Amino acid sequence: MPDIRYWTQLATEQFTPTSIVEQAVATEEAGFDGLSLSDHYQPWWEPGESGHAFTMLGAAGQATERVAIGTGVTAPVHRYHPAVVAQAFMTLEALNPGRAYLGVGSGESLNETPCGMDWPPVREQVDRMEEALEIIGRLFDGERLDYDGRFFRTKRAL
C-alpha cells in the first residue's frame, strides 16, 4: 500500500501572518501531515497580503509540534540568493528538527520583477535553477563554498 500523506497549502497572498499561524495550528489539529506556504513578494490581488514566508514558517514551526513545514514554492533564482535560501531552511530545520522541507520553483514575473529584475527567458531560468540547486545542495552538505557561476557567486559561504 502506498504511503499517502495529506498536506495543505496556506495562501500567504490572501491571509495575514497571524491568520497563517492560526491555520498552521488548525492544520496540525486536523491531522494533516504537513503544510506549505506560498512564497510571494506581493499579493495576487488588492487588497491582499504578502507576509514573508520564511518568517511565517518559523512562527508556524514554533506554534506546532509535528506537522512538516516548508515552501510551496520558493524561487531561489531571482529575488533570493541561493545561499540565503539555504541558510533560511537550515535555520528552520535547526529550530524544527526533521520537519522542514524546501520546495523550489522558478517563480513568476508578478513576484520577481518588482524587486528590479527583468524576467529572463526560459533557458536562463533553467540555468539559474541548476546553479541555485548546486549551491543549496552543497551548503546543505556542510561544504564551505567558493562558487563562481554564470549567475551566482559565493566566497567561503557556509
Image (cartoon, rainbow, N blue to C red):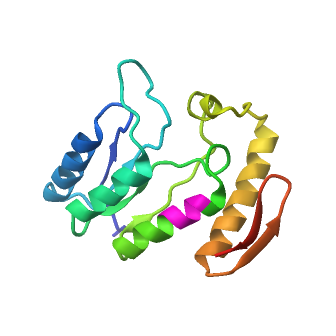
Picture coordinates of residue 45, whole percent (x, y): 42, 20
Picture coordinates of residue 36, whole percent (x, y): 38, 51
On the picture, is 55 further left or further right than 33?
right
Residue at the image point whose x is 60% and y is 29% from the top: 114
Residue farthest along the front direction in this orientation = 155
Residue 80 sits above or below residue 119 on the image = below
Magenta segment, which residues? 84-88
Label the magenta part by its dominant secondary structure.
helix
State which quarter of the image contains the N terminus.
bottom left
Residue at the image point whose x is 59% and y is 60% from the top: 84
On the picture, is 18 further left or further right than 11?
left
Picture coordinates of residue 4, whole percent (x, y): 33, 62
Nearer to the camera, 4 or 77? 77
Picture coordinates of residue 88, whole percent (x, y): 50, 62
State which quarter of the image contains the C terminus.
bottom right
Residue farthest along the left direction in this orientation = 29
Residue at the image point whose x is 75% and y is 48% from the top: 126
Quadrant position of residue 150: bottom right
Residue 102 sits above or below residue 37 on the image = below
